[in-house]
Image (tube, rainbow, N blue to C red):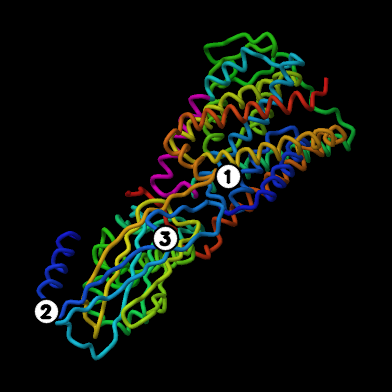
Amino acid sequence: MPVSVLLILGMGAAVGFISGLFGIGGGFLMTPLLIFLGIPPAVAVATQSAQIVASSTTSVLGALRRNALDHKLGAILVAGGFVGSALGVWFFAAARRAGQLDLVIVVSYVTLFTIVGSLMLKESIREFWSRRKGAAVRPRRRAGEHAPYLGWPLRMRFYRSKLYVSVIPILGLSLFIGFAGALLGIGGGFIVVPALLYIFRVPTNVVVGTSQFQIVCTTLVALILHAVTNQAVDMVLAILLIVGGVFGAQFGARMGRHLRAELFRFLLAILLLAVGLRFGLELVMEPKEPFSITVQEVRT
Amino acid sequence: MRLAGALLILLGTMVCAHAETLITSLSNHRVLINSNYTGTQIAVFGAIERDAQTIARATGYDIVVTVRGPRQFLTVREKERLGPVWINQDQQKFPTAPSYLNVLSSQPIAEITSDQLRQRQKVGLSAIINAGDFTLVRDGADQPFRDALYRLKAEEGLYLEDGRGVTFLTPEIFRAAIALPATAPPGNYDVDVTLFADTVILARTQTHFELVKTGFEEQVGVIARDWSLAYGLATAALAIFFGWLASTIFRRD
């Protein structure tokens, strides 16, 4: 692929900066950027998973040092994530065979990003207003308040997270994240973290470490499956993305410490909506070249 | 089928009393391309041999050189509007499309021979692409797909036609330069040389060369295809290594 090495490094650094700033993986930004750059969606998705593995390894190691990780919850998340990842890669290959992979990726991005982006935007604006009016910010945990599905059968006790909940919704969440991650080339941190925080009420200090632990495991599986099933992983591109991303993330993280939480969520929401919108345009605009060629098989 | 065709032609040239023979040679039978490189060239040299019985030709000779790269099973898809969105809908399969196709001739193909002969013998780019057996389904809707295949391949520099690509050095000796872009896939390439005079085919030869890609990226590509599990594991290991490296270098606690 004739894509400039410096451009990829620069993009990796820029996205790494943003991901460090927001404390997220950055896959949700990098994969779309690669696609907009003209890299085939299949290669972009599969290769980006290598970068996610690298960046989440860094965060997991950090979390381990600070002992900010719930191993038990992580293990349950990983179990669901594996199944989701395998399903995602299988679906990816099936869509590719049918010639509709690009469509599936674009539609999924539009849907996911519009929904998550609007939810975040709504939340951050509400928070902003309530702070303005001087009202108390939502209490973290009210006694006896639980969503009904947390009390489903197969309840399990997670000491680190101070939880006693059914494993079914946890498995469901991680299954979905694994599936979406493999299909879209995202880690899914921007979904797992809020879900663990707001739905399961996992304490803040273990949320990031635990979710990153799940992401590193499921993305690792997705990466290897993508390499075997779809042969769409480009090692050279992966290294460029990783190197750019690693350095960018460090500078981003340093800047991020001065950013206020609700402003941060607001900016992230805008970012998500913008990416979703950009993909939506791709879908509705008349293509310059309606025809495309795919090589099914090489006969030698 | 191709063998039978070749035999027929051979028979035809043997029966003909006015036998010109065609002798061709390639500058190279093994071409190395570095994937970072801009491409390369390979030269075809040829001589037309006449014997004592060969009748004098009123018109000069014409040469058509057709180069075909490794065959590919291609699917061409067309995006169509469905409600508000554009999605891939119709498709045509081309089971044995050459990955690279280059037709060089001593003058534009249309001036060398008749339309009918071109279609029958598949001489020239459009005759090859529009040949009946080039696609699987022929229901009349295949023409836009053939055109699209040609257009897209031409944009990549893989389907070319040059009406002045063959030069006669003397009336009986010619040469042609086959340009191979860096995107030309590795594999076996067939070079067909056809001799025309007065719109009929007098002789035909076929020769081959092999295109081998070298360079780091190409080797990585081969490993990714043939050792996909090892490749995946290696990429994963690299990613983990870089992640670990970053966490040690930028350790904050």
The disc placed on residue A109 is 1
| In this rendering, position of residue B131 left or right of residue B55 | right
Q: Which residue is drawn at the image coordinates 61% and 27% (left, top)? A: A215
Q: CA distance from mark 3 to mark 1?
A: 22 Å
Mark 1 and mark 3 in contact (Cβ < 8 Å)? Answer: no
Residue B44 appearing in the image: yes
**B37 to A187, vertically: above or below:** below
Vertical position of residue B8 compared to residue B186: above or below: below
Is residue A198 in view?
no
Q: Position of residue A177 (x, y in %)?
A: 57, 30
Q: Chain of mark 2?
A: B
Q: Residues within 10 Å of mark 2 (few under 14, many from 20)?
A: few
The subunit carrying tag 1 is A
Q: Is residue A94 magenta?
A: yes
Q: Main secondary structure of the magenta part?
A: helix
Range of the magenta residues?
A: A82-102
Residue under numbered circle 2? B17
Q: Amino acid at mark 1?
A: Tyr
Amino acid type at mark 3: Glu
Q: Quadrant of residue B9?
A: bottom left
Residue A216, position as x, y percentages in the image:
61, 26
Residue at the spot 43% in from the left edge and 53% down from the top edge:
B185
SS at circle 2: loop
Residue A189: which quarter of the image? top right
Q: CA distance from mark 1 to mark 2?
A: 71 Å
